[in-house]
Image (cartoon, rainbow, N blue to C red):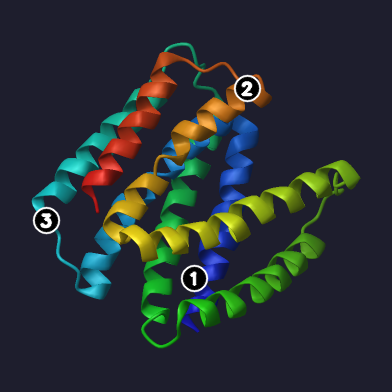
Amino acid sequence: LYVIIAAIIGFGIGDTLIFRSIGLIGVSRSYTIGYSYPFFAIALATVFLGEPFLLRYIFGAVIIFLGIVNIVLERNVAFDKSNAKGFILAFAAAISWSIGTTLVALGLRTVNIIQANTIRFPLLFIFLFIFSILRPGESRLNKENLSLLLLSGILGMTIGGIVFLFSIQLIGVARAAPLSSSSPLWAAIMSSLYLKEKITWRVIMSSIMVAAGTYFLF
């Protein structure tokens, strides 16, 4: 049950929020804010899982906070209603991911990783499919968009998830998790190359600060 709820909150709600945020403030800013989720996850784990909260966690949280402040206060970004909504959605995604991470940790106490993935992804598909039908508004999904979504799902959730599990087996969670948290930096680079987003020094610095801060959280 924990694994199912974690999939709905983490992947279903969290990913939906981050996708909406991307449409408003871009890939680099959305993922930089969204990937502050380890800070919230560690706070939840301390309360609900009984995990220790060490001094280095506080240090990492401060670095992440400064990175987020740096990107939110970027001077060349007009803070209008659209941008404000994008920032809020990215923060909401971070909180959703942290809740999902905590719940899946509880679920893995009774099931193994293979069983968890086998259960959560089909049920997540059903949840999102029903949600897309019930949601009002005209769908803009075409063959090109569907192909890109399928490709992102294969690369991100399937291959990325499998590679991450292998990395945990080879080098352990303490090193694998901080390395994976560098994804905002790569997202900023990829969005600059392929989406032609303007990448400022503030965006780059915030990406690096979030990745560095997350390292101290593990």
Q: How crowded is mark 2: few (under 14 residues within 10 Å), some or many (20 or more)?
A: few
Is label 2 or label 3 in front?
2
What residue sits 58% from the left and 53% below the top? 15
Number of numbered discs visible in the structure rendering: 3
Q: Which amino acid does label 3 sit on?
A: Leu
C-alpha distance separating marks 2 and 1: 33 Å
C-alpha distance separating marks 2 and 3: 39 Å
Q: Mark 2 points at which residue?
A: 193
Lower sequence index among marks 2 and 3: 3
Depth check: give the residue in front, 189 or 96: 189
- In the picture, the quarter occupied by the C terminus is bottom left
For the question of whether residue 84 can be seen, the reply is: no
Residue 134 versus residue 156 in the image, above or below: below
Residue 53 versus residue 93 in the image, above or below: below
Is label 2 or label 1 in front?
2
Q: In this view, does 193 lie to the left or right of 176?
A: right
Q: Is residue 28 left or right of residue 95?
A: right
Q: Mark 3 points at which residue?
A: 54
Lower sequence index among marks 2 and 1: 1
x, y percent for residue 171: 32, 58
Q: Which amino acid does label 1 sit on?
A: Ala
C-alpha distance separating marks 1 and 3: 25 Å
Q: Residues within 10 Å of mark 1 (few under 14, many from 20)?
A: many
